[in-house]
Image: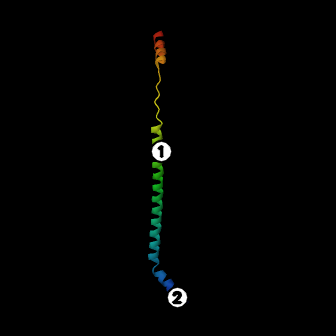
């Protein structure tokens, strides 16, 4: 049993560099995937909000007509009195 442990330890020690590289590569890949997922989520939410805002602005456009004849008359009377 003791010899088996020693053999496993030696084998693991010999492959330690390869294992470390593989773990490092996987960690970098997981980080990249996480960042990519977050970026996609932020872009999707932003696009959805932008679509809703522009759609609500286009549907809520009201045109208001105001008759300013009385104000124009009043202002022209003020200018003629001087």
Residue 18 image offset from top left, x and y in percent: 44, 76
Is residue 55 placed above or below 29 in the rendered structure?
A: above
Is residue 54 placed above or below 42 in the rendered structure?
A: above
Is residue 57 placed above or below 38 in the rendered structure?
A: above
**Which numbered disc, 2 or 1, marks the residue closer to the eye?**
1
In the image, what residue occupies the spot 47% across and 48% down?
Answer: 48
The residue lying furthest to the front in this view is: 59
Residue 64 image offset from top left, x and y in percent: 47, 28
In the image, what residue occupies the spot 45% across and 55% down?
Answer: 40
The residue lying furthest to the right in this view is: 1
Residue 52 image offset from top left, x and y in percent: 47, 44
Numbered disc total = 2
Residue 38 image offset from top left, x and y in percent: 48, 57
Q: CA distance from mark 2 to mark 1?
A: 66 Å
Is residue 15 placed above or below 63 in the rendered structure?
A: below
Q: What kind of element bears circle 1?
A: helix
Q: Identify the disc placed on residue 52.
A: 1
Work out which quarter of the rendered image holds the N terminus and state it.
bottom right
Specify how the rendered protein is coloured: rainbow
Location of mark 2 (residue): 4
Q: Identify the disc placed on residue 66.
A: none
Crowdedness near tag 2: few (<14), some (14–19) or many (≥20) residues, C-alpha within 10 Å? few
Q: What kind of element bears circle 2?
A: helix
């Amino acid at each position: 049993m003791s010899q088996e442990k020693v053999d496993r330890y030696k084998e693991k020690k010999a492959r330690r560099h390869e294992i470390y590289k593989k773990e490092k590569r996987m960690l970098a890949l997981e980080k990249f995937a996480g960042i990519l997922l977050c970026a996609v989520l932020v872009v999707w939410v932003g696009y959805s909000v932008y679509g809703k805002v522009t759609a609500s602005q286009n549907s809520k456009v009201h045109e208001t007509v105001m008759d300013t004849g009385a104000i124009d008359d009043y202002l022209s009377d003020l200018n003629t009195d001087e």
